[in-house]
Amino acid sequence: MPQQKPEQVALRALSAADRSRAELDERLERRGFDDAERQQALDELERLGYLDDERTAALRAERLADRGYGDAYIRADLEHRGLPTEEALAAIEPERERIERFATKGRAWLARRGFASEG
């Protein structure tokens, strides 16, 4: 069986879930692709619109906010994935409004979900 091209490996990963460029680069590196092959494949996927870190960050931040996570958790998640954080956080429902929406869950629940403690 011929070895897959890096684009094929990356597209398969993207078909399962949104991934950042950093996550795909790491996956391709583990599969044995050299730096030039990885960068060329990822550049091409960006050019074609399959890979977009800003879009992925915005979608991920929105999903986490809707599921009841605070800004600290969302920021850490995006950073861990190698995604840009500030624009994604600025575009979601403000943390204060999410705190009010999930207030019935209790302070401990909010703290575990990365909400800032109320001063």
Image: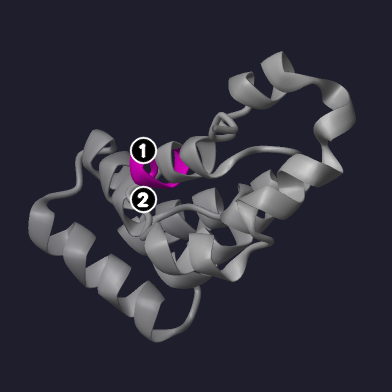
Magenta highlight range: 77-81
**Residue type (three-letter) at the residue carrying disc 2:** Leu
Residue 29 lies within the magenta run: no
Above/below status of 45 relative to 115: below
The quarter of the image holding the C terminus is: top right
Above/below status of 72 relative to 2: above
- In the rendered image, residue 45, in percent from the top left (x then y), is placed at 39, 74
**Residue type (three-letter) at the residue carrying disc 1:** His
Element marked by disc 2: helix
Circle 2 crowding by C-alpha within 10 Å: few under 14, some 14–19, many from 20 = many
- On the image, numbered disc 1 is attached to which residue? 80
- In the rendered image, residue 88, in percent from the top left (x then y), is placed at 50, 64
- In the rendered image, residue 25, in percent from the top left (x then y), is placed at 27, 50
Q: Residue shown at 10%/54% (left/top)? A: 35
Towards the viewer: 60 or 25: 60
Above/below status of 90 relative to 31: below
Residue 51 seen in render: no
- On the image, numbered disc 2 is attached to which residue? 24
